[in-house]
Amino acid sequence: MELFYCQNASDGVFTLNEEESAHCVRVLRHKAGETINVIDGSGTLYECELLDANPKGAACKVQVASSCFGVHPYRLTMAVCPTKNIDRYEWFTEKATEIGVDVIATVIGDHSERRTVKTDRLRRLVLSATKQSLKGALPEVPEPVSVKDFILSAPADAIKMICYCFEGEKRSIPEVLSSETPSVMYHQSTVMPDRSTVMPDQIGHLPEICILIGPEGDFSPAEAELAIAHGWKPVTLGSSRLRTETAAMVAVTQVYTCLGD
Amino acid sequence: MELFYCQNASDGVFTLNEEESAHCVRVLRHKAGETINVIDGSGTLYECELLDANPKGAACKVQVASSCFGVHPYRLTMAVCPTKNIDRYEWFTEKATEIGVDVIATVIGDHSERRTVKTDRLRRLVLSATKQSLKGALPEVPEPVSVKDFILSAPADAIKMICYCFEGEKRSIPEVLSSETPSVMYHQSTVMPDRSTVMPDQIGHLPEICILIGPEGDFSPAEAELAIAHGWKPVTLGSSRLRTETAAMVAVTQVYTCLGD
């Protein structure tokens, strides 16, 4: 199954951009009248009839729309400091998209050596991983903000966790999730609704989770204190010594395992 | 903390190879009389006194040996078909080593497009990830075998799981582990012994787990049937569509989360 991405339909007709059109018409040789699958990044899959096999702007008409295509039953924001070697960070964005994430927020910490990322490049990687892993919802990749601004702006009702190396009482992500979300109970008793039964109106009620992962030099004490003061729960990823991108990947996998279907 | 790797000590003296010696003496500028940390890959950390700062063959004498350095309380063999793009497979070997794995077995399936790997290169990556993540035990990287030979040669008393996309009854890895290993109960009641208390004589009694991950084209029906016939449990990694290396990484993380400390 091949997905094409197009942000807006007008009167039920999507007109693919040049890149998608060329792929559809030149590479995959689709002809007018054939059915192609389009996503608009909102979570809906559109089965469309190709009207005009124009390699510069292929137009297709929506036949069937199925909501919640490949969505997961939680909302996860991963706020991760960029790694010195950007390949490692880009790799994380691809893997997190495959497994299940809603927002990949680049945050810059007091100890971050790298203080910029190419957001457009990350968005392209995320789009290609979304299509490759057959998901209808495109994770957001906002512009970078400071760790402190992110801590202060996170939604009040989210389950907020910060992974740092400072000493002190910490729980694991599964421990926090099982104490904070009934969904984990569903999961354990395996009556978790499968994703196809997650309806749009439920999405607003899915557990909202934010996880902060620091840079190679960890968070500064000021950042950690600010997070704790604002209700962020300190969590541990276990006793292995993990690189930034590996820690972020383990956190995404733990949420997927606890709350996924 | 910097680790040096040297396979054999003679009379309590390690002589580092040329590469390790140059790194120790030329790059880190260690002098005779200083303390350096050496691993032999068996799980023991050796605090050593540098006797001879020879950049071609630095010799150091063991002062203190601590067993079970950075070990995890399970034995995990990941048998994974190599990916077409070898970078993805190499990336997996690094990540699995960081998180915790004991054997990374390359297996060649009936549907494998790639049928060879550079085992020496994988071993170098695994060694560097072992040192970087401060582990005393070096994961084994055996020469490739066929999926069928691997299925037949796996230890009888291991918990054996195969991830495939065929229809049928499947459990998740955490479900299988919690039904098969008392350790998971320890973990859930958080009285899991921390790694420093895992003594060598216990290692033989750690839960032994083997997980098989197929190629891009999945296992052949014959491979899947052979595995089931030999007591392998079919498992699902959830509803996300994961690439081979992502699936393998998720499996390693789930074992680490369920059985790790």
Image (cartoon, coloured by chain):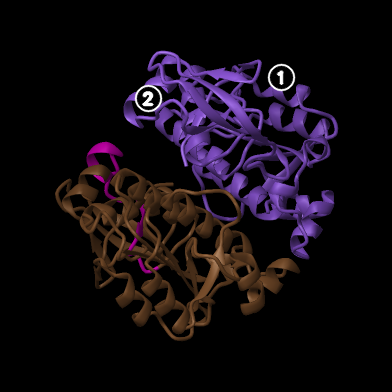
Chain colours: A purple, B brown
Q: Quadrant of the C terminus of chain B?
A: bottom right
What residue is drawn where x is 47% and y is 24%? A124
A50, above or below B248, in the image: above
Q: Earlier in the sequence, mark 1 or mark 2?
A: 2
**Label 1 crowd (10 A; few <14 / some 14-19 / many >=20):** few
Label 1: chain?
A: A
Label tally: 2
Along the line of sight, the residue nearer the viewer: A66 or B67: A66
Q: Is residue A246 left or right of residue A168?
A: left
Q: Is residue A203 left or right of residue A244?
A: right
Q: Secondary structure at mark 2?
A: helix
Along the line of sight, the residue nearer the viewer: B107 or B1: B107
Q: Position of residue B258 (x, y in %)?
A: 63, 64
| Residue for badge 1 | A149
**Range of residues picked out in magenta:** B24-42
What residue is drawn where x is 78% and y is 37%? A203
| Residue for badge 2 | A25
Q: Nearer the viewer, mark 1 or mark 2?
A: 2
Asked if labels 2 and 1 touch by Cβ distance under 8 angstroms, the answer is no
A167, above or below B10, in the image: above
Q: Going by the picture, which residue comes out furthest to the bottom?
A: B156
Q: Amino acid at mark 2?
A: Val
The tag on residue A68 is: none
Residue B34 located within the stretch drawn in magenta:
yes
Do the residues indicated by labels 1 and 2 lie within the same chain of the protein?
Answer: yes
**Label 2 crowd (10 A; few <14 / some 14-19 / many >=20):** many
B175, above or below A8, in the image: below
What residue is drawn where x is 16% and y is 50%? B18
Q: Amino acid at mark 1?
A: Asp
Q: Quote the CA–CA distance across marks 1 and 2.
A: 45 Å
